[in-house]
Image (cartoon, rainbow, N blue to C red):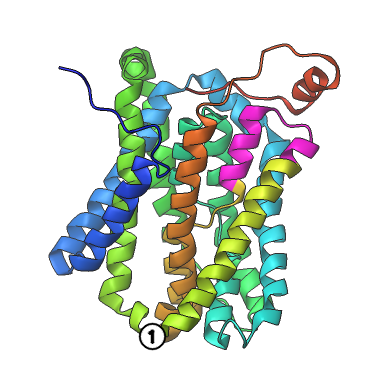
Amino acid sequence: MKRLQWPSWMPIDPYILLLLGTVGLAALLPARGTAADVASGASTAAIAFLFFLYGARLSTREALDGLKHWRLHVTVLACTFVVFPLLGLAARGLEPVFLTHSLYTGLLFCTLVPSTIQSSIAFTSIARGNVPAAICAGSFSSLAGIVITPLLAATLLGSSAGGFSADSILEIVLQLLVPFVAGQVLRRWIGSFVVRHKKVLGLFDRGSILLVVYVAFSEGMVRGIWSQVSPVRLAGLLAVEAVLLAVMLTLTWYGAKALRFGRADRIAIQFAGSKKSLAAGLPMASVLFGAEASLAVLPLMLFHQMQLMVCAVIAKRRSRDPLEPDVTRGRDAAARSAVGTGTRSG
């Protein structure tokens, strides 16, 4: 039987339809009560298992190369905690024409939270970028965000930032680092099996993102934050965030190119440096905003959905790009040597 394929003339990526379908499912049938707890637990388990698989697939040398790639990590951190907040401050001029004060406060908070981990890695993997560097960059951003985000919020939002307990760090360690290390330890026995089944890993990449989207959007529906903003204001917020995302995607790609990073590194920088983490932002918002957290996280939730959909298209297109040769002429070869470009994945 002939295998069905997506028509080449269709302009919409099928994964985007899956994302939209997931959002629609969450809007019609959001997870509540026990179902929400089960879905949240499944999402946490999926992320942990995803990191276990990455640990099993990546060689120890690749992981160490990722850790040593300091220029890439500094670039991602600068995009996340310097460029993003500056753009957020610049958006103050849009208040109150496009944004209410509450929406602007939420937008500024959105620019202060750390980068995503799982989706940045998944999209980097799909686009055949530097996965080890993306893992380290996303992890560094999340760990730094535990301290940097509250400090920036206290300074720029004019409110006192609540402290974070050791449980926050412990959760990151247990959910991300421990599974990755476990995969590294067991790689000797299961590594070849995981590599042979890269297609299954690719499906899991996409499936884990869909699950995260469903859980996040369900929570927003249950908390009723969508009914607190008029359609006109919501459209204005979406337009502002679309411009913000477009600016960051452009700056991360061409800025990394200007800094003479190789293709695999530019992909990791673009996906890790242009995203904001809903998983990290929600608990932080509950500490910083208290009872006002539901409306404050609306810009972050919308930006999160937007970045997933846009980056899914970009990752798919990047996956079809020709890989750079191992040796090129002149300054490109010297640049890759200088920045220590990591091994390509996929």
Q: Which residues are magenta?
A: 256-272
- Residue under label 1, please give it: 228
Q: Position of residue 76 (x, y in %)?
A: 66, 46
Location of residue 149 by image quarter = bottom right
Could you tell me the amino acid type at mark 1?
Gln
Q: Is residue 269 magenta?
A: yes
Instruction: Report the predominant secondary structure element of the magenta stretch.
Output: helix
- Foreground of the two, 128 or 48: 128
Residue 48 at x, y percent in the picture: 34, 41
Residue 151 in sight from this viewpoint: yes
Q: Is residue 258 above or below residue 225?
A: above
User: In front here: 159 or 198?
Assistant: 198
For image coordinates 49% across by 82% down, the residue present is 233
| Position of residue 36 measured from the top left corner of the image (x, y, whole percent) | 20, 63
Is residue 6 shown left or right of residue 65?
Answer: left
Q: Is residue 268 above or below residue 340?
A: below
* 319 w.r.t. 253: above or below: above
Q: Which residue does the image show at 50% across and 29% down from the upper left?
A: 319
**What kind of element bears circle 1?**
helix
Residue drawn at the location 20% of the way across and 61% of the way down: 37
Classify residue 107 as left or right of residue 248: left
Q: Is residue 3 magenta?
A: no
Tell me the residue at 43%/75% (across/down): 286
Dot 1: few (<14), some (14–19), or many (≥20) neighbours within 10 Å?
A: few
